[in-house]
Amino acid sequence: MKKGFVPIIVIIVLAAIVFLGYTIYYTIGLFDPCKSPIGCGGPKLYESPQSSTAPVPDETANPDLIGANWKTYTFEEVGLSFKYPEDKLFLEYPEGCFRTGGKLWARFKLQKPDLSWYSSEDVKNCNIPGEDGTQFQVSIEPKEININTLSQSEKSTKIQLAGQEANLIYNRGTFGGEGGSVIKFNRNGKGFWIYIPAESSGPGSKIDPLFNQILSTFKFTSDETANWKTYTNNQANFLLKYPPDWTITQKPKMDIQEDGITLRGKEGLIEIGWATQFGAGGCEQNYSLSLKDQTVKSCHGVNSDGTEWWRLFGWRGSNVFPIVYGDATAHSPYKDNREVILKIFSTIQTSQ
């Protein structure tokens, strides 16, 4: 064998060993090519599989995510709203039904109701018979309700809902004998009750997690008069808000020294006048009315016909009309209607 041939064989063997070692190093993943002198552009014989699917956020793990993509249902009349999943809970009646006579309802089912049996006019007028199987209901009564248990078999506990203390009552017989619970509370003269089904029947049953999430989205707006109309009086320097179904009319003008308006609604009426001078009345002002920026005294009483009245309340107006005065009446039954009258009073701002 020639002397020059041996080094060539040695070089070939060494090259084969280096190539084999290089290949094994990459194959078993011990070498990160991005950290090598040749960088990520070098040969890559093995690549560990990676998922291209982005992780789905767990809504239940973060309270701020609960209901992020849910639909919002709002009772504008009382400033209450909550969210619910449209793909799991369906309105039994079209939105807007059961909003007359002072009582408000929203009823939901786990199966989408079939309204194809009814004419468009029946659907529009909410002329749809009720069906069994209601799974979730929010009901608002025009007056306060008994929020305590009704029988010894019922158990109750205090909870917080939308910043409001409420009673959670297990009631087995609600809605066709299905096991479930009822949440009851009163707010601003109205009674609220919410039916939620339980995971299982029995006094020890728990609220289904889905409905616990729905309850966590309940909230009252900070201003329940947000959708009310605003009346501004620059002559007597005051403004107020009133419900959208109320009307304002100008009172017959007595003379250039006196003027006024009348607000009317199904709950009652309020008359406000402004003048350069005003004679004192003959009743005792023994009632305190809360306006937005002050408290004023008023005569007050309840009539035998079930109406409630406030008389001769007033405050200082403008330089032109320094006297602002008025009367108000809550229609019978006054306990059902007085809250709206008092709420209007609470919006009166006597200095602009």
Image (cartoon, rainbow, N blue to C red):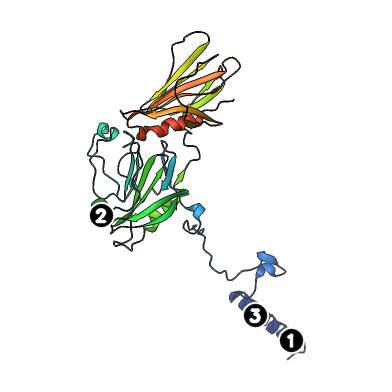
As shown in the figure, which amino acid type bears the numbered disc 2?
Gly
Mark 3–mark 2 Cα distance, whole angstroms, equals 77 Å
Left or right, 118 with respect to 325, comes to left
Q: Mark 1–mark 2 contact, CB under 8 Å?
A: no
Residue of label 1? 5
Could you say whether the residue bearing mark 2 is in a helix, strand or loop?
loop
Q: Mark 3–mark 2 contact, CB under 8 Å?
A: no
Residue of label 3? 21
1 or 2: mark nearer the eye: 2
Mark 3–mark 1 Cα distance, whole angstroms, equals 25 Å
Residue 337 in the image: above or below residue 199: above
Residue drawn at the location 26% of the way across and 40% of the way down:
115
Say whether disc 3 or disc 1 marks the residue closer to the N-terminus.
1
Mark 1–mark 2 Cα distance, whole angstroms, equals 101 Å
Is disc 2 surrounded by few (<14), some (14 to 19) or many (20+) residues within 10 Å? few
Could you say whether the residue bearing mark 1 is in a helix, strand or loop?
helix
Q: Quadrant of residue 117?
A: top left
Is disc 3 surrounded by few (<14), some (14 to 19) or many (20+) residues within 10 Å? few
Q: Quadrant of residue 208?
A: bottom left
Q: In which quarter of the image is the C terminus?
A: top right
As shown in the figure, which amino acid type bears the numbered disc 3?
Gly
Residue 340: x, y in percent?
A: 41, 32
Left or right, 20 with respect to 230, comes to right
3 or 1: mark nearer the eye: 3
Q: Tell me the tag on residue 173.
A: 2
Say whether disc 3 or disc 2 marks the residue closer to the N-terminus.
3
In depth, the one of 112 and 135 nearer the eye is: 135
